[in-house]
Amino acid sequence: GESVGLHLPTLSVQEGDNSIINCAYSNSASDYFIWYKQESGKGPQFIIDIRSNMDKRQGQRVTVLLNKTVKHLSLQIAATQPGDSAVYFCACPCPGGGADGLTFGKGTHLIIQP
Amino acid sequence: KAGVTQTPRYLIKTRGQQVTLSCSPISGHRSVSWYQQTPGQGLQFLFEYFSETQRNKGNFPGRFSGRQFSNSRSEMNVSTLELGDSALYLCASMDAGLTDTQYFGPGTRLTVL
């Protein structure tokens, strides 16, 4: 079964608003998580990662929050811009995920409305 | 540093044929992983090569194979192509262990007719 998954297939936000994309994982032994952004016609692009010894990590306009108690992580994008329009994936080298590479969620398509 | 490059970018084949895709990792990266991306199944791990050896393998049939050269460049091969093999094939490189960041190439879009 799936070891990491996203809550919503599509998220529509107004330009300038903050976006929050959620992801859940099933194995409490998972200790490293990555968020990728994939634009149309391109490969996934690394955004930010977090290890299980942290609850929060910030980058440029992005923040990842990790709640190990409920096995949930989220990607927050501040002041969403048109260039943020893409599909966002959470991923982990999840133990027991059925393979030894990265296991990806299905992806959330972020749509920016003007 | 230059990013991960993949060739060709687009490929059209017919059922029963075989295909070879190429990936050049970021300079200095010794690990190369391959993934298949389809609308139905999403991103799925195929295999990983490290220092010319297959280190990990996903749940794909033996028609899917790969190799890595001494310069870390990698190729993957799909034999006896099926319609369901139509997908975006992505290559990712990283420096060492699995908990290091994987950087993806633009992918090769394979269409099987």
Image (cartoon, coloured by chain):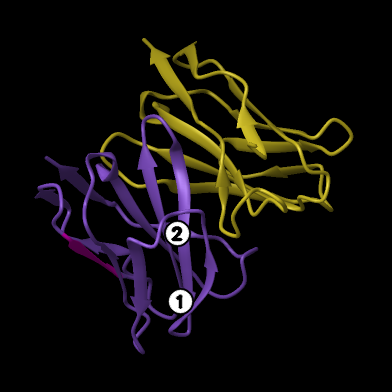
Chain colours: A yellow, B purple
Task: Return the disc, 1 or 2, that comes first in the chain's sequence.
Answer: 1
Q: Specify whether A73 is left or right of A89.
A: right
| A95 magenta-colored | no
User: How far apart, in angstroms, are the residues tagged by discs 1 and 2?
Assistant: 10 Å
Amino acid carrying label 2: it is Tyr
Residue A45 drawn above or below residue B62? above
x, y percent for residue B61: 41, 56
Q: Quarter holding the N terminus of chain A?
A: top right
**Other-residue count near label 1 (Cα within 10 Å), few / some / many at <14 / 14–19 / ≥20:** many
Check the residue under mark 2 and report the chain it is in: B
The crowd level at tag 2 (other Cα within 10 Å; few <14, some 14-19, many 20+) is many
Please, what secondary structure does the residue beneath circle 1 have? loop
Please check whether the numbered discs 1 and 2 fall on a single chain. Answer: yes
Q: Quadrant of residue A83?
A: top left
Residue A57, position in %: x, y?
Answer: 71, 45
Q: From the viewer's perspective, is residue A44 above or below residue A25?
A: below
**Residue denoted by label 1:** B29
Residue A29 placement (x, y as % from top left): 82, 51
Mark 1 belongs to chain: B
For image coordinates 68% across by 38% down, the residue present is A64
Instruction: Give the magenta range.
Output: B18-23
Q: Residue furthest bottom?
A: B70
Instruction: Look at the image and tell me in which quarter the C terminus of chain A lies.
Output: top left
Look at the numbered disc 2 and give the secondary structure of its residue.
Answer: strand
Residue labelled with disc 2: B103
